[in-house]
Image (cartoon, rainbow, N blue to C red):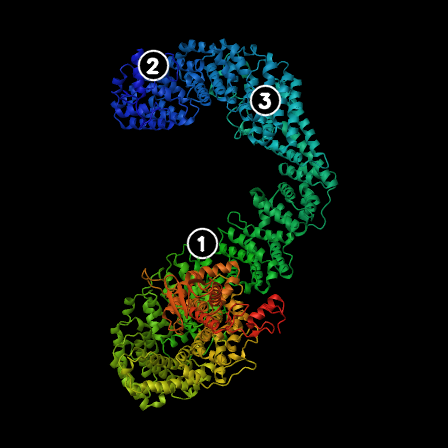
C-alpha cells in the first residue's frame, strides 16, 4: 500500500510507479505486454508507453503530458475525469509538435478508457479526443486503424452525451463525404474488434474480477455488446457498396456463431434492440448472406414477434418486415399458424400492450407481405385478425390513451380497406368485413364515448369516400357493382343500428350523442385525416406500399412483389376538388336515414316529451336543415293557418314547412317554464330561419315571435347564439337593428328598474336573465357597432342612470337587493367593451353618478361593500375608456368637467368627516391614476385647475377655521394680539365635521401627489399655493391646545397618504414658495408667520434662504399686525445684530409714546411686543437698556396710572389696554429672568407692588376667565408672581448683599403672604368650578403659574391660612380644626384632572405631613393594650381619598397581569388618576416616616387590615419599567454606577413637560423605594405570601435595582448615626453588608453580628453570635431570636431595631419578666410590656400574644398552668 510518510524498504531508493513496473516486466520477459483488461489476443492494446526502452521514450513526451497520462491510468474516477479534462485543455493550448508527441501512446489509452464504467469519463474522453484531432489533424492517420473500432463503438454509446461527443469528434476528423472512405480504410480492423467483443469477451475478461464488483462487470459487458452490435450496423450503413463483398466472409463467420443468434433472446432489452437493428441492416446491405442463413434468421426474428418491450419493439418490427421482404422462404423455417400468428394475435388482442402507436402502423405492411398459402383459408384468417384488432380497442390502456386508440382505429380501417380491395367480388369476405367487422365496430364505438375520440367517424367517412369515388370512376362495371353492393349493404346495416339506438323511449345519452356525431361527420366529408395522421406507418394507397422509411421502398420493390403492388395502386385517392360534395351513393341513403330518425324522434317527443330525442333532433336539423326534413317532422298534421297573425306571416307559414314547425312546435317548447337549458331549441329556430328565403322574411318572423310568442330568456338565447356565430348573426342582423326589438328592450329596462325599486325579487333567475340580456345588447359589438340601434342603447343607459341616482334614498338592506348591483354589471360590460365607440352624453352622466356613489361614504349612500367594489370597477373602466380617446379630452368630456365641479363643492360646502374625506381622496386617487395614462399632457393640469378655489374662496375658508389655535401662541408669547376676535369653541360646532379648508387642502395636495408622478404642467403657481394652504391647515392643527380626536385622525390620514411638505416640494419647482409665505405673513400675520417659524425650526428651510426676506429692517416699520407677527416668528432665528437692529427701531417709538398711541400696534403695544420677543430669546445682554425700558414703564405709571390695571374690574376695560398690560407684565417677568445687574429699591417697589396689584385684579375678575385676553392677563400675572417667588426662594446669604436692605423682610412679611393669601383661595375656588377641564385647555392656562407659585408657600404661611371651615361628620381625627380644614380642602384636589393642581397640592401637603403624627402621639394612651390588635388610621382625609383612587386604579390597571408594564399616555385621564394615587402614597409614607415606632406599629396594622399596601405593590409592578434607567443619562464614566430612577431624585416640576413620558415610571420607582425603606416588614410579608410568578418578578427586580441602594443607605445611616446607646456600641462594614453591635453591662459582654441579605429588605436579616461572656446559652439564644424578630417585624431601620432590642434586654436586667408566649419583654410588633397576669400562676403576658394564643388554640386557658384565664 502506498503512503507518503511510510518507511520505504531498505534499498528501494525510488517510489513505485506503473511505468517502472512495465519497464521491468519488459526487460525480464523481452516482450511488451499490452492489455485492456486481461485479454491476450493480438488486438489488445496497452494503456501507457510500455515498449522496450520505455523510460527513454517516455522521456521524449512533454513532462506535463507524461504526468497527465499517468493519472489516466489511476483507478479513481475523479482523478481520471480531471486528468482527461486537463488533457483536453493541454491539447488546445500546447503547440502542435508537443501534442503530436503523445499520439503514439494515445490509441492504447483511448481504447481502454473509452470503455470506462463511468459515463462522465467516457464523455470527457471523446471531448478531449475532439480537441486532439483539431490540433493534430492529418497526423492522426497512422493510428486510425487501432482507434476506429473503439471510436465507432463510442459513437453508439448508450449514454447519449458520450455518443454525441464521439460523433462530433468523428465529424471533426472527417467531413461527411470522406467518412465512408475512412471506414473502408479500417474495415478489417473494425470488424475484428467488434467480432471479438461479441464472440470472445465475457464480463470477467473485460474487467478484473478481483477488483471490480460483479454488478459493474455485467453492466460494462452489456454496454460493450450493445455498442458492438450498433457499431456493426453503423459499419454496414456507412460502407460503400463495392466494399461490402470483401467483408462477406467475416460476417459469414460471425453468423455461423450460435452465440450471435442468442443475442435475439438476451435478457437485456438494449442488446435485443441492437441485435434486431443489426439484422435489419444485414437484410438491407447483404441480403444474399441472410437468405443463406434463413433457417437461423426466420425463427430468431419471427418467433420474437410478441416481444413487448418498448425499447425492442420498433427495431423488432422493422426486422420482421425486412425479414419478410428479404428472405422469401422464411415461412418454411417457422410454423406460422402455431408459432407466429398466435403470438401476433395475443399482442394485437391486448392492444399492443401499451405500444399500439409503435406496432399497429406495421400491421398493414405485415399482412400485405403474407403469402396466400399461409393465410388460407382467407375468410377465417382475416376474420380472426380483424376481430383481434378490434378486441385490442377494449383494453383500458387503449381507451384512456388518445394516441393508442387512434393507432388501433387507423390500423383497423387500413387493414379493412386493404382486405376489401384484395378480395372485392368475394361475397363471403365482403359480408364478413361489413356485417361482422365494420358494423359491430361502429356499434361498439357508438356505445362508448371514450372510443369516439379516436376519430373513428372520420376514418369511416374517408373509407366510404374512397369506395364511393372508386365506384364512380371505375370503368369495370363488375367492380363498380360490387362496391355499390357493399355500400348498399353498409347503409342498410348502419341504418339498423342507428334506428336501434334512437328507437328507445329512454334512449342512452351516449349512444344518441354518438349517432348525431356520426351523421354530422358523414354529412361533411371535408373533415380530413391527413393533418392528424402521423408519418410513421401512414398508408398511401395511390403509391405502392407502406411508408415505413426510405429503406422499405427498396424492399417493397424487390422480386415477386409487383403484382400485389399494382393491385394496391388501383384504388384512387379522394381529390381535394370533390371533397366538399357528397356522392349520390351516399346522399340518398343518408337523407333517408336522417328522415327516418327525425320522424322517430318527433314521435317520441310528441308522445312522451322525450328531452333526449328533442336534443337529438336539434343536432340533426343543425346539419340537415331542409324543407324535406321539416315536412317529415310535421307529418300528417294539417297545415292550420295561424289565427290573428298578419297576412305576411300567415303566407309564410303556409308556404314554408320550417316556419309552420316553428309556430306549431318550437315556440311551445321554448315557453315551457321548467326547461332550464333551451339552447338546442334555439338551434332548431336557427335551422328553420335557414329555410327562409330572405332577410325580410326572417325579420318579420322574429318580430312577430318576440311580440307575442317568445319569453325574454328565449330572446336572450337567440341573441347569444347570434353573437357566437357570424353565420347566425348574418341571419338576424335586420331584426337586431329593428325598431320592435329596440322598443321592447327599452320597455324591459324600465320595467326592471321600477320593479326593483318596488320589491326585492331581483335575485331570482327570472330577473337575472333579463339583466343579462340588457348587458349583452349594450356590451356586444360587431365590427365596432352596437348589436341593436344606437338610439335604443342611449335610451336604456338614461334609464339605468335615473335608477342609480335614486339609490341614495334607499336603506342599505334595500340596496342589498336592489338593481344597483345589476346596473353595475351592465355598465361595466358596456364600458369594457366600448373600445372603438365614443361615449354618448348619457353614458358620461352615468359615469359621473357612479363616481359620486364611490366618492361618498357608506353613511350617505347606504350601499353595501360588495356593491361599492362593483361601482369602483365600473367607473374605472369607463374613465379608462374616456382618457384613451384622442382630442381635447377635458373640453369634450362632460364627466371630467362636472366631476371637478362636484369635487370642489364637496370639500368647500359639504360637511365631511374623516371617513368621508378618506373615501373621497381614495376615489380621486383612483381617478387621477387613470387620467395619468392619457396622451393629453394638459389634462391633469386642467383638471386640478378646475378644482382649485380662487383667492377669495381660500380667504373665506381660512376665516371659517375656529380660532382656538391662537391660545398657545399667545400663552407662549410667540404672537401678540390687542383685540378680542376669537370666542368660538369646538363644542359649539359639530365635533366630527372637518373644516372646509382642511378638506380642500388635503384634496388638492393628494391630487398634486398623483399628478406630479408625471410631468404635469400647473399654471399660476398652483403648486406653491396648494403647499402653502396645506401648511396653513397643518399649522392650525398643531397650534390647537387640545385637538379633538377627529382632527388627530385627519392628520394620521395625511401621514398614511404621504401628504407632507417635503414630499410635495420634492415633486416640482417651488422657487417662489418662500416669497409667497413672507408676502402672506406680512399682509395677514397670524398663522402665516408661525408657518415660517415652523419651517425654519424643522430645517425644511435654511436660515440663509429666510435672511434675504428680512434684510431691510426698516421695511417692517411702521408696524402692522402682519409685520409684527412676522418679526415675532423669525425672532428666535435672528442673529444678535439683526435683533439689535429691530430693537433700535423699537426704542425711539417707546420713548416717544403718548397716551393715545400706547395701545396701538404701531405704538407702545407693538414695539414692546417685539422687544419682549427679542428678550425672550436671551439675546439682550445690555443691562442698561433693560433698566432704561423699566424706567420708561415707571414713567408711564406715574403719568397715566389708569393704563395700569391695578385692582380694577376688567369687564369695562378695552382689549387694547389689556394687551398693553400683558406685554408690560411679560416684560417684567423676562426682566427678572435675564437682567443680571442689580435693581434699585424704587424699581423693586414698582415691580412687587405692581405684581400684587395685578394679582388682586386677577382675583377679583374670576368670572371673566372665559375671555381669552383676561385668561392671558391672569396667566402672566401669576407668572410674574412665580418668577418673584422663585427669585427670593433661590436667594442665599451670598446674593442678599446686592439687594436693598429691607427687601427680604418685606417679601417675607408682606408680599409673600399677600401672594399666597390671594392664590390659595383662588386655587380652591377655581378648581371647585371646573373639575373636568384638562390641563391643556386654555381655560386652565393660569393654573400652571398659579400652582407653581403655590409650591413656594412656606409652611408657617400655609398653617396660618384662614380657609372656610371644611369638616366631615363622623371623621375620626386628632388634628385641630384649622389643620383638618386645610387637609380636607387640599387632599381631594389630588383627584383633580389637571396635573399642576395635583403637584401643587402635593407640595403643600408634603410640608404639613411631619406635623400630623404628633397629634396622634398625644392621644397614644387611648390605644391601650385592652384591644387585642390595636390599629390606628393615618389621616382619614387621605385614606378616604386613597379608597376612591384604588377603585379608579382598579378600572385602569386591574385587568393587567402583574409584571406586564403599562404605559400611561401623558396628560390623559388615566395619567391624572395614577399620578394622584402615587402622590397620595408619597404623602402617606412621608407621614409614616415622621411617626414614632409605636405609632408606626399602629398605622401599619391599619394598612395591613385594609390591604391598601398590597394593592399599591401590585400596581407598582405594573407601572415600574423593566429597565428603570434614567432617561436623560449622558455618557457615564465606567467606574460609576449607572443612573436609574432609584438613584436619581424625582423633580416634580409643573412647567417642564419634556419628561412627562417618564413621570409615572419614575414616580412609581420613587414610591417603591420609599415603601421598601419605611415599610420593609410589610413588603416582606406581602412578598412571602404572593404567588410564585409574582414572587420571582419582585425578587429579580428588587435584587437588581433596589437592594444595593437600600443596603448602602442602611449601612451609611449606621455609620453616620449620632444616636448614643448607654452600654452598647454599633459599628458597620459596608463591603460585607454587616452591622456589629456590642452590648456590655457589668461583667456581661454580648456581641451580635447583623448580616443583610442580597435581596434586602425582602430576604430575612440573619443574626449571628460574636463574643459571649457571662450569659447562659439558653438566654443567649433567646436574645438572638428576639433581635432577629425585631429586625424582621418592625417597620424601621436597623438602628431602631437595635434600640428596641437594647430596651428589651435592659428591662430584663431591671427585673421585668418575659412574656412566656413570645419569650420577650417588649412585644416585637406593638412594643408593649407584659401586663395581662394569670390569677392562678401570676405570670404576665402581652395582650396581643394572649389574643393570638386564644384564637389559634380555640381555648381560653393559661398557656402555663392551663387554668381558665379570667
Quadrant in which the C terminus appears = bottom right
Q: Which residue is mark 1?
A: 885
2 or 3: tag closer to the N-terminus:
2
The residue lying toward the viewer, choosing from 1147 and 1198, is 1198
Furthest residue toward bottom: 1199
Q: CA distance from mark 1 to mark 2?
A: 90 Å
Instruction: Determine whether the residue tagged by mark 2 lies in a helix, strand or loop.
Output: loop
State whether residue 466 appears in this view: no
- Corner quadrant of residue 1755: bottom right
The residue lying toward the viewer, choosing from 644 and 115, is 115
Q: Which residue is mark 2?
A: 33
Say which of marks 1 and 2 sits in front. 2
State whether residue 500 appears in this view: yes
Q: Are marks 1 and 3 in contact (CB under 8 Å)?
A: no
Residue 347 bears which disc, if any?
3
Q: CA distance from mark 1 to mark 3?
A: 68 Å
Left or right: 116 in relation to 463: left
Instruction: Determine whether the residue tagged by mark 1 lies in a helix, strand or loop.
Output: loop
Instruction: Determine whether the residue tagged by mark 3 lies in a helix, strand or loop.
Output: helix
The residue lying toward the viewer, choosing from 1229 and 1580, is 1580
Local crowd at mark 1 within 10 Å, few (<14), some, or many (≥20)? some
Q: CA distance from mark 2 to mark 3?
A: 53 Å
Number of numbered labels in the structure image: 3
From this view, report whether residue 737 is shown above or below residue 125.
below
Q: Are marks 2 and 3 in contact (CB under 8 Å)?
A: no
**Image spot of residue 457 (x, y percent):** 60, 30
Amino acid at each position: 500500500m502506498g503512503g507518503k510518510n511510510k518507511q520505504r524498504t531498505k534499498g528501494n531508493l525510488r517510489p513505485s510507479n506503473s511505468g517502472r513496473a512495465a519497464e521491468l516486466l519488459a526487460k525480464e520477459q523481452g516482450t511488451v505486454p499490452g492489455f485492456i483488461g486481461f485479454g491476450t489476443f493480438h488486438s489488445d492494446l496497452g494503456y501507457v508507453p510500455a515498449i522496450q526502452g520505455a523510460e527513454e521514450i517516455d522521456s521524449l513526451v512533454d513532462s506535463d503530458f507524461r504526468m497527465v497520462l499517468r493519472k489516466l491510468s489511476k483507478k479513481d474516477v475523479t482523478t481520471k475525469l480531471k486528468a482527461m479534462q486537463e488533457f483536453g485543455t493541454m491539447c488546445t493550448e500546447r503547440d502542435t509538435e508537443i501534442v503530436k508527441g503523445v499520439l503514439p501512446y494515445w490509441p492504447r489509452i483511448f481504447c481502454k478508457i473509452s470503455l470506462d464504467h463511468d459515463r462522465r469519463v467516457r464523455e470527457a474522453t471523446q471531448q478531449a479526443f475532439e480537441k486532439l484531432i483539431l490540433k493534430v489533424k492529418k497526423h492522426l492517420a497512422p493510428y486510425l486503424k487501432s482507434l476506429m473500432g473503439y471510436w465507432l463503438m463510442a459513437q453508439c454509446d448508450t449514454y447519449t452525451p458520450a455518443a454525441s461527443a464521439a460523433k462530433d469528434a468523428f465529424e471533426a476528423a472527417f467531413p461527411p463525404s470522406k467518412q465512408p472512405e475512412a471506414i473502408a480504410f479500417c474495415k478489417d480492423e473494425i470488424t475484428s474488434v467488434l467480432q471479438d467483443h461479441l464472440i470472445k469477451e465475457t464480463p470477467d475478461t473485460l474487467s478484473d474480477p478481483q477488483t471490480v464488483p460483479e454488478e459493474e462487470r455485467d453492466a460494462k459487458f452489456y454496454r460493450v455488446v450493445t455498442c458492438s452490435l450498433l457499431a456493426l450496423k453503423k459499419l454496414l450503413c456507412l460502407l460503400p457498396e463495392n466494399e461490402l463483398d470483401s467483408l462477406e466472409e467475416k460476417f459469414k463467420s460471425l453468423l455461423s456463431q450460435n452465440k450471435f443468434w442468442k443475442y435475439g433472446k438476451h435478457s437485456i432489452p438494449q442488446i435485443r434492440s441492437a441485435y434486431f437493428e443489426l439484422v435489419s441492416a444485414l437484410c438491407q446491405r447483404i441480403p444474399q448472406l441472410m437468405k443463406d442463413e434463413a433457417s437461423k434468421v426466420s425463427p430468431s426474428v419471427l418467433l420474437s414477434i410478441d416481444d413487448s418491450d418498448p425499447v425492442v419493439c420498433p427495431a423488432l418490427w422493422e426486422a420482421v418486415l425486412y425479414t419478410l421482404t428479404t428472405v422469401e422462404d422464411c415461412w418454411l423455417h417457422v410454423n406460422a399458424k402455431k408459432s407466429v400468428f398466435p403470438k401476433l394475435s395475443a399482442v394485437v388482442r391486448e392492444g399492443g400492450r401499451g405500444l399500439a402507436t409503435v406496432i399497429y402502423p406495421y400491421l398493414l405492411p405485415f399482412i400485405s407481405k403474407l403469402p396466400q398459402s399461409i393465410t388460407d383459408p382467407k375468410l377465417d384468417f382475416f376474420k380472426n385478425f380483424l376481430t383481434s384488432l378490434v378486441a385490442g380497442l377494449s383494453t383500458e390502456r387503449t381507451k384512456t390513451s388518445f394516441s393508442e386508440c387512434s393507432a388501433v382505429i387507423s390500423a383497423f380501417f387500413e387493414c379493412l380497406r386493404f382486405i376489401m380491395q384484395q378480395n372485392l367480388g368475394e361475397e363471403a369476405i365482403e359480408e364478413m368485413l361489413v356485417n361482422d367487422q365494420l358494423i359491430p365496430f361502429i356499434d361498439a364505438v357508438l356505445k362508448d364515448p371514450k372510443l369516439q375520440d379516436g376519430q373513428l367517424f372520420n376514418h369511416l367517412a374517408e373509407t366510404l369516400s374512397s369506395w364511393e369515388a372508386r365506384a364512380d370512376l371505375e370503368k369495370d362495371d363488375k367492380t363498380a357493382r360490387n362496391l355499390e353492393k357493399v355500400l348498399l349493404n353498409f347503409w342498410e346495416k348502419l341504418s339498423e343500428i342507428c334506428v336501434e339506438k334512437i328507437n328507445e323511449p329512454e334512449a342512452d345519452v351516449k349512444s344518441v350523442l354518438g349517432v348525431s356525431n356520426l351523421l354530422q361527420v358523414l354529412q361533411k366529408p371535408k373533415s380530413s385525416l391527413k393533418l392528424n395522421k402521423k408519418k410513421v406507418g401512414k398508408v398511401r394507397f395511390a403509391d405502392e406500399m407502406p411508408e415505413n422509411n426510405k429503406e422499405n421502398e427498396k424492399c417493397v420493390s424487390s422480386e415477386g412483389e409487383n403484382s400485389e403492388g399494382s393491385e394496391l395502386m388501383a384504388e384512387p385517392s379522394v381529390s381535394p376538388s370533390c371533397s366538399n360534395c357528397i356522392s349520390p351513393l351516399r346522399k340518398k341513403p343518408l337523407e333517408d336515414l336522417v328522415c327516418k330518425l327525425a320522424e322517430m324522434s318527433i314521435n317520441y317527443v310528441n308522445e312522451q316529451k322525450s328531452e333526449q330525442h328533442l336534443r337529438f333532433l336539434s343536432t340533426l336539423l343543425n346539419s340537415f336543415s331542409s324543407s324535406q326534413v321539416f315536412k317529415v317532422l310535421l307529418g300528417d298534421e294539417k297545415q292550420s293557418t295561424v289565427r290573428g297573425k298578419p297576412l305576411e306571416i300567415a303566407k309564410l307559414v303556409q308556404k314554408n314547412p320550417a316556419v309552420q314547425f316553428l309556430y306549431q312546435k318550437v315556440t311551445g317548447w321554448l315557453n315551457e317554464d321548467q326547461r332550464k337549458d333551451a339552447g338546442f331549441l334555439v338551434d332548431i329556430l336557427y335551422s328553420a330561419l335557414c329555410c327562409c328565403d330572405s332577410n325580410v322574411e326572417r325579420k318579420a318572423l322574429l318580430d312577430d315571435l318576440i311580440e307575442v310568442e317568445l319569453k325574454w330568456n328565449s330572446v336572450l338565447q337567440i341573441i347569444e347564439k347570434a353573437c357566437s356565430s357570424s353565420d347566425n348573426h348574418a341571419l338576424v342582423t335586420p331584426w337586431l337593428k329593428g325598431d320592435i326589438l329596440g322598443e321592447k328592450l327599452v320597455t324591459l329596462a324600465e320595467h326592471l328598474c321600477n320593479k326593483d325599486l318596488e320589491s326585492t325579487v331581483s335575485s331570482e333567475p327570472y330577473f337575472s336573465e333579463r339583466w343579462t340580456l340588457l348587458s349583452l345588447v349594450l356590451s356586444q359589438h360587431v365590427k365596432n357597432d352596437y348589436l341593436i340601434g344606437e338610439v335604443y342603447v342611449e335610451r336604456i343607459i338614461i334609464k339605468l342612470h335615473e335608477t342609480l341616482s335614486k339609490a341614495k334614498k334607499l336603506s342599505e338592506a334595500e340596496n342589498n337587493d336592489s338593481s344597483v348591483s345589476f346596473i353595475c354589471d351592465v355598465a361595466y360590460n358596456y364600458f369594457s367593451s366600448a373600445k372603438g365607440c365614443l361615449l354618448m352624453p348619457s353614458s358620461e352622466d352615468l359615469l359621473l353618478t357612479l363616481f359620486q356613489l364611490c366618492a361618498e361614504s357608506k353613511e350617505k349612500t347606504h350601499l353595501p361593500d360588495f356593491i361599492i367594489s362593483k361601482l369602483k370597477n365600473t367607473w374605472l373602466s369607463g374613465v379608462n375608456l374616456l382618457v384613451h380617446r384622442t382630442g381635447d379630452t377635458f373640453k369634450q368630456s362632460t364627466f371630467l368637467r362636472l366631476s371637478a365641479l362636484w369635487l370642489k363643492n364637496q370639500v368647500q360646502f359639504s360637511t365631511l368627516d374623516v371617513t368621508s374625506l378618506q373615501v373621497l381622496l381614495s376615489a380621486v386617487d383612483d381617478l387621477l391614476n387613470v387620467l395619468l395614462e392619457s396622451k393629453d399632457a394638459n389634462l391633469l393640469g386642467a383638471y386640478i385647475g378646475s378644482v382649485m378655489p380662487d383667492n377669495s374662496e381660500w380667504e373665506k375658508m381660512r376665516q371659517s377655521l375656529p380660532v382656538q389655535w391662537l391660545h398657545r401662541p399667545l400663552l407662549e408669547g410667540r404672537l401678540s394680539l390687542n383685540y378680542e376676535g376669537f370666542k368660538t369653541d369646538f363644542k359649539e360646532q359639530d365635533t366630527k365635521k372637518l373644516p372646509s379648508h382642511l378638506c380642500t387642502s388635503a384634496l388638492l395636495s393628494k391630487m398634486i401627489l398623483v399628478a406630479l408622478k408625471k410631468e404635469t404642467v400647473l399654471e399660476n403657481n398652483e403648486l406653491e399655493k396648494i403647499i402653502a394652504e396645506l401648511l396653513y391647515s397643518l399649522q392650525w392643527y398643531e397650534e390647537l391646545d387640545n385637538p379633538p380626536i377627529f382632527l388627530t385622525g385627519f392628520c394620521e390620514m395625511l401621514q398614511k397618504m404621504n401628504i407632507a411638505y417635503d414630499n410635495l416640494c420634492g415633486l416640482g419647482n417651488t422657487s417662489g414658495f418662500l416669497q409667497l409665505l413672507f408676502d402672506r405673513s406680512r399682509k395677514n400675520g397670524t398663522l402665516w408667520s408661525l408657518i415660517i417659524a415652523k419651517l425654519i425650526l424643522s430645517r425644511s428651510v435654511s436660515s440663509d434662504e429666510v435672511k434675504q426676506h428680512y434684510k431691510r429692517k426698516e421695511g417692517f416699520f411702521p408696524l402692522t399686525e402682519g409685520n409684527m407677527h412676522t418679526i415675532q416668528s423669525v425672532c428666535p432665528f435672528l442673529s444678535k445684530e439683526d435683533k439689535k437692529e429691530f430693537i433700535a427701531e423699537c426704542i425711539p417709538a417707546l420713548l416717544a409714546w403718548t397716551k393715545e398711541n400706547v395701545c396701538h400696534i404701531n405704538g407702545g403695544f407693538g414695539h414692546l411686543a417685539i422687544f419682549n420677543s427679542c428678550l425672550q430669546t436671551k439675546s439682550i445682554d445690555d443691562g442698561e437698556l433693560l433698566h432704561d425700558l423699566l424706567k420708561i414703564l415707571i414713567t408711564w405709571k406715574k403719568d397715566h396710572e389708569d393704563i395700569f390695571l391695578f385692582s380694577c374690574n376688567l369687564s369695562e376695560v378695552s382689549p387694547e389696554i389689556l394687551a398693553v398690560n400683558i406685554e408690560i407684565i411679560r416684560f417684567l417677568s423676562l426682566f427678572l429672568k435675564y437682567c443680571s445687574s442689580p435693581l434699585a429699591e424704587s424699581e423693586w417697589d414698582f415691580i412687587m407692588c405692581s405684581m400684587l396689584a395685578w394679582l388682586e385684579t386677577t382675583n377679583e375678575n374670576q368670572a371673566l376667565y372665559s375671555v381669552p385676553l383676561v385668561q392671558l392677563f391672569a396667566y402672566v400675572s401669576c407668572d410674574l408672581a412665580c418668577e418673584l417667588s422663585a427669585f427670593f426662594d433661590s436667594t442665599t446669604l451670598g446674593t442678599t448683599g446686592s439687594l436693598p436692605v429691607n427687601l427680604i423682610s418685606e417679601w417675607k412679611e408682606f408680599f409673600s403672604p399677600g401672594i399666597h393669601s390671594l392664590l390659595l383661595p383662588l386655587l380652591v375656588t377655581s378648581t371647585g368650578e371646573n373639575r373636568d377641564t384638562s390641563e391643556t385647555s386654555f381655560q386652565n392656562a393660569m393654573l400652571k403659574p398659579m400652582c407653581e407659585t403655590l409650591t413656594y408657600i412656606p409652611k408657617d404661611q400655609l398653617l396660618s391660612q384662614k380657609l372656610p371651615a371644611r369638616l366631615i361628620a363622623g371623621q375620626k381625627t386628632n388634628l385641630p380644626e384649622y389643620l383638618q380644614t386645610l387637609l380636607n380642602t387640599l387632599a381631594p384636589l389630588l383627584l383633580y384632572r389637571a396635573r399642576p393642581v395635583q403637584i401643587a397640592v402635593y407640595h403643600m401637603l408634603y410640608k404639613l405631613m411631619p406635623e400630623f403624627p404628633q397629634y396622634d402621639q398625644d392621644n397614644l394612651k387611648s390605644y391601650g393594650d385592652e384591644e387585642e390588635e390595636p390599629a390606628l388610621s393615618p389621616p382619614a382625609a387621605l385614606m378616604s381619598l386613597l379608597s376612591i383612587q384604588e377603585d379608579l386604579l382598579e378600572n385602569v390597571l386591574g385587568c393587567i397581569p402583574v409584571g406586564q408594564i403599562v404605559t400611561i399616555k401623558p396628560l390623559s385621564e388615566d395619567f391624572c388618576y395614577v399620578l394622584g394615587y402615587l402622590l397620595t402614597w408619597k404623602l402617606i409614607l412621608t407621614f409614616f416616616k415622621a411617626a414614632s415606632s409605636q405609632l408606626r406599629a399602629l398605622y401599619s396594622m391599619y394598612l395591613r387590615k385594609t390591604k391598601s399596601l398590597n394593592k399599591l405593590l401590585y400596581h407598582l409592578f405594573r407601572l415600574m419599567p423593566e429597565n428603570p434607567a434614567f432617561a436623560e443619562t449622558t455618557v457615564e464614566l465606567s467606574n460609576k454606577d449607572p443612573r436609574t430612577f432609584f438613584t436619581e431624585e424625582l423633580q416634580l416640576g409643573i412647567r417642564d413637560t419634556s419628561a412627562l413620558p417618564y413621570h409615572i415610571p419614575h414616580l412609581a420607582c420613587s414610591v417603591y423605594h420609599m415603601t421598601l425603606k419605611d415599610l420593609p416588614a410589610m413588603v416582606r410579608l406581602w412578598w412571602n405570601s404572593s404567588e410564585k410568578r409574582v414572587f420571582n418578578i419582585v425578587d429579580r427586580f428588587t435584587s437588581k435595582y433596589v437592594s444595593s441602594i437600600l443596603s448602602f443607605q442602611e449601612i451609611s445611616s449606621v455609620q453616620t448615626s449620632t444616636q448614643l446607646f448607654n452600654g452598647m456600641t454599633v459599628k458597620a462594614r459596608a463591603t460585607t453588608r454587616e452591622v456589629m453591635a456590642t452590648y456590655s453591662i457589668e461583667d456581661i459582654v454580648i456581641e451580635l453580628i447583623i448580616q443583610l441579605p442580597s435581596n434586602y429588605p425582602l430576604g430575612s436579616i440573619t443574626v449571628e453570635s460574636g463574643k459571649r461572656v457571662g450569659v447562659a446559652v439558653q438566654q443567649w439564644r433567646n436574645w438572638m431570636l428576639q433581635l432577629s424578630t425585631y429586625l424582621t417585624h418592625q417597620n424601621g431601620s436597623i438602628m431602631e431595631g437595635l434600640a428596641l432590642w437594647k430596651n428589651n434586654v435592659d428591662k430584663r436586667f431591671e427585673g421585668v419578666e418575659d412574656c412566656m408566649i413570645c419569650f420577650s419583654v417588649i412585644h416585637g410588633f406593638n412594643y408593649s410590656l407584659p401586663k395581662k397576669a394569670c390569677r392562678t400562676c401570676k405570670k404576665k403576658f402581652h395582650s396581643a400574644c394572649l389574643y393570638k394564643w386564644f384564637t389559634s388554640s380555640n381555648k381560653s386557658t393559661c398557656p402555663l398552668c392551663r387554668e381558665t384565664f379570667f
